[in-house]
Each structure stands twice: as C-alpha cells, then as structure tokens.
Amino acid sequence: MSELHPVQIREARWEDLPGILELYRYLNRTDPVLDAGNPAVAALWSRLMEDRNTHYVVGEQEGRLISTCVLTVILNLTRSTRSYGLIENVVTHPDCRKQGVGTRVLKYAQQLAWDANCYKVQLMTSRKEPEVLRFYETAGFTANEKTGFVVRA
C-alpha cells in the first residue's frame, strides 16, 4: 500500500463477491473454497446485499479488495430498544497487513453501527497472538469487558 495508490473504504457492492471470497481464503484456510458463480452462493449474496441489517465493509486499492469485515446490526428489546452491532470475518490480505487498512475497515463498520443507533459493537476472535489482540485494541475494542462463549453444531 502506498500514497500513490490510496485505499477506499466502503460498503460492498454486488460485484465484490469474488474479491471477498478470495480474502476469505486467508481467514479460515480449512474452509471449502466457495465459487461466486455457484447459484447457491450468488443467491445468498443477493439476500445479504438486500438485508438492511447486514453490512459488508471492504478496503479497495486499485480495483482489488484487500480487507473486509461484516457488521450485523441486531435488533434489541433492551437498552431502550437500541440495537447492537456484531463484527465478524475480519481479514486483510497478508501483503497489506500492518498498514492501517484493517483498522480503517473496522472504524468504518463501527460508524455504520453508530449511524444505526447501536449502543455497542461486539467482536470476538479465536486468535491469541498479542499483535492480533493489539490490532483490535487499536481499533477501539476492549478485551476485558465481556466473556464470550461458543457452542458449535
């Protein structure tokens, strides 16, 4: 990433699906590779693009997606009916890490949550490396406020 090639942070568009799927290869390396041309994948992407509570945020440089995350706004009956946000699937291309792009993507997602009147934004990670935890803290998240639990099917 260089000053000559600025990074645009924005919400994803329909045509971003292949680039997002490419980035996901760096997220969970054991996941099956999805094909954007698969009708089931395309149908799901269409539903996600139409869902006003789902926001895919991307960092794009020279027409190439280099970072992404997804924000889900969850409707809520507590906190005076204010929603909350959940950020997942945070990934930056390995060649573009430690340059501030991922932080900018997360900040953009946070702003979308604030614009939707969310009272908080949550993020969980299974990563334990100190540099990964510092990355999330730099983006404004605190690690000791909640305890997360996971159950899998």
Image (cartoon, rainbow, N blue to C red):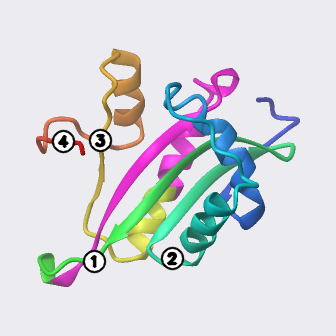
Residue 51 is marked as 2
Q: Which residue is mark 4?
A: 150
Tell me which label, 2 or 4, sits earlier in the chain. 2
* Dot in front, 3 or 2: 2
Q: Which residues are magenta?
A: 81-108
In which quadrant is the C terminus drawn? Answer: top left
Residue 59 is marked as none
Question: Residue 25's x, y, as percent?
Answer: 61, 32
Classify 116 as above or below 62: below
Which SS class for mark 3?
loop
Q: Is residue 107 visible?
A: yes
Question: Residue 81's x, y, as percent?
Answer: 19, 83
Q: Nearer the viewer, residue 7 or 31?
A: 31
Which SS class for mark 4?
loop
Q: Residue at x 27, y 74 (%)?
A: 83
* Dot in front, 3 or 4: 4
Q: Nearer the viewer, residue 35 or 124?
A: 35
Tell me which label, 1 or 3, sits earlier in the chain. 1
Tell me which label, 3 or 4, sits earlier in the chain. 3
Number of marks drawn: 4
